[in-house]
Image (cartoon, rainbow, N blue to C red):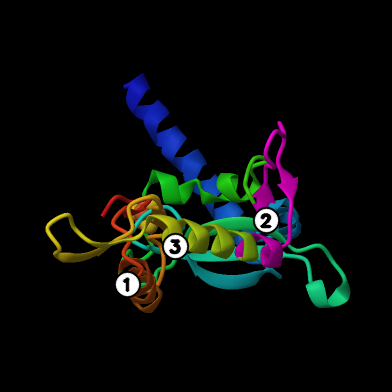
Amino acid sequence: MNMELSRRQFVKGASAGMVSTTLGALGFGGIEAALAASIRPYKLSGVTETRNTCTYCSVACGIIMYSKGDLAKGEQADIIHIEGDADHPTNRGTLCPKGAALLDMVHAQTRTKYPQIRKPGSDKFERVSWEVALDRIARLMKDDRDKNFIAKSADGVTVNRWLTTGFLAASATTNETAWATYKVVRSAGMLAFDNQARV
Ligand code: SF4
């Protein structure tokens, strides 16, 4: 009997508390102001949204990057959040663990952001411009192909092979870029051709 009364008292007290909380939330009292003050501002308010493709694998999931800082005002832009793009037909907003950790990759101290070169005999890499890097790559490729290109096999069959240089392409790219890359590499005679997704 005592237990029965206790339950009733409990329910009665809880109902009274709920009514008072609801009235407060509707603006009856200072609770509403206290509640509003306790809510943190939405962390993605005032950010710039940029669509992109996950860099990791050939699934090429769509992502949205959120950045703060207006470059036009001379501010430093900084990516603060990355999530799956719900409108993307491939992943519909989902990301695998690698994609979900993209923000760490973006901010990693060890991420390569520009071309570097290690000169013969040197023990360190030095930053160079894209112009210098592309000129050097083209020069070395041309010299190597001129020296090692195999037009015909020992049996006199035309083979057009270039076996001394390989090419590593990116898989997270558009079909058009991938098609153009494939054509350039194969047309040059290169057989060693791969990408980081191994597809
Ligand atoms: S690594 Fe994961 S998130 Fe990135 S493209 Fe591949 S499957 Fe998608």
Q: Could you tell me which quadrant the C terminus lies in?
A: bottom left
Q: Are marks 2 and 3 in contact (CB under 8 Å)?
A: no
What residue is pinned by disc 2?
A: 114
Residue 36 appears anywhere in the view: yes
What residue is pinned by disc 3?
A: 146
Label 1 CA crowd tier, 10 Å (few <14, some 14–19, many 20+): few
Quarter-of-image position of residue 65? bottom right
Residue 158: image x %, image y %? 18, 67
Q: Are marks 3 and 1 in contact (CB under 8 Å)?
A: no
Helix, strand or loop status at disc 1: helix
Mark pair 3, 1: CA separation: 14 Å
The residue range painted magenta reads: 113-134
* For marks 2 and 3 on the same chain, the one whose residue lies earlier in the sequence: 2
- The image quadrant where one finds ligand 1 is bottom left
Q: Is residue 22 above or below residue 176?
A: above
Say which amino acid is labelled 3: Asp
Q: Could you tell me which quadrant the N terminus lies in?
A: top left
**193 part of magenta stretch:** no
Question: Residue at horizontal 33%, vertical 53%?
Answer: 194
- Relative to residue 59, is residue 108 drawn left or right? right
Q: Are marks 2 and 1 in contact (CB under 8 Å)?
A: no
Residue 97: image x %, image y %? 40, 44
Nearer-the-camera pick, 18 or 179: 179
Which residue appears farthest toward the top when viewing the image? 2
Quarter-of-image position of residue 129? bottom right
